[in-house]
Amino acid sequence: MLSHFDNTETLVAIGHELGHIKGQKRFKCEIFLALLGTAGFGLVTISLRLWISPIVTLILLFVVMFLMLNLVLWHDEYRADLEGARVTSPEALIATLEGLQENQKNMGKNDYGSETHPPLHVRIELLMRLLD
C-alpha cells in the first residue's frame, strides 16, 4: 500500500492514525455516554408508559443509538484529520483527501460517507476553514 503513496501522503496517513490513537481514551468515554443516553431514552419512554409497542420502542432505541454512535465516530475522524494536518499541513491533508475523492469518482462511488467516516467533501471543507 505504501508504494502507492508519496512521502507527504504517508506522513498525513500516519498523522491521521496517530490522531485516532491519541483520542482513544476519550473515544471510549464518548461511546459509553452514547450508549448510556440511549438506554436512558428507553427507560424514560417505558416509565412514561407511552402508548408505543415494545418493538417500536426497540427500533427507536436502535435508531437513536446508531445516530449517536455515528456522531461520535465522525467527530473522531475530524479530530484525527486535525492531527494529520498538524503533523504535515492542512494543504497536504486536503490534497490527500482530494486524491481519495478522485479515486472514488473514478470507481463510480458517491461521496456519502459511511457509518464511521464523514463524506470526504465535508472533511475537506472543514480543513479549508483552517486555512482561512
Image: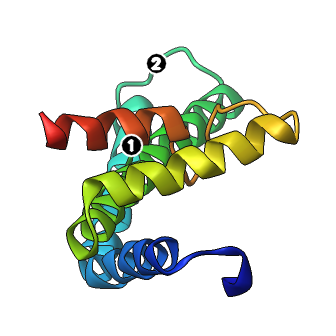
Q: Which residue occupies the foreground of this view, 60 or 122?
A: 122
Mark 1 or 2, nearer chain start: 1
Residue 4 in the image: x percent, y percent? Answer: 72, 75
| Residue at the farthest left position | 132
Assess whether mark 2 and mark 1 are in contact (beta carbons under 8 angstroms).
no
Q: Is 8 above or below relative to 18?
A: above
State the scheme by which the image is colored: rainbow
- Crowding at mark 1 (Cα within 10 Å: few <14, some 14-19, many 20+): few
Query: What is the C-alpha distance between the residues marked 1 and 2?
Result: 11 Å
Reply above or below: 63 against 74: above
Q: Quadrant of residue 71?
A: top left
Per the image, the residue denoted by label 1 is: 43
Going by the image, does 103 lie left or right of 27? right
The residue lying furthest to the right in this view is 107
Residue drawn at point x = 63 percent, y = 42 percent: 101
Q: Is residue 115 visible?
A: no
Q: Which residue is farthest front?
A: 6
Which type of secondary structure does the marked residue at label 1 adopt? helix
Q: Secondary structure at mark 2?
A: loop
Residue at the spot of label 2: 50
Q: Is residue 71 above or below residue 63?
A: below
Q: Label 1 sits on what residue type?
A: Leu
Relative placement, left or right, of 98 versus 127 is right
- What residue is shown at x 48% (from left), y 74% (from top)? 13
Left or right? Give the position of 84 relative to 104: left
> Quadrant where the C terminus lies?
top left
Q: In the image, what residue occupies the spot 44% across and 82% down? A: 14
Q: Quadrant of residue 82?
A: bottom left
User: Which percent across, then down, holds residue 57?
Assistant: 58, 31
Say how many tags the image has.
2
The kind of residue tagged 2 is: Leu
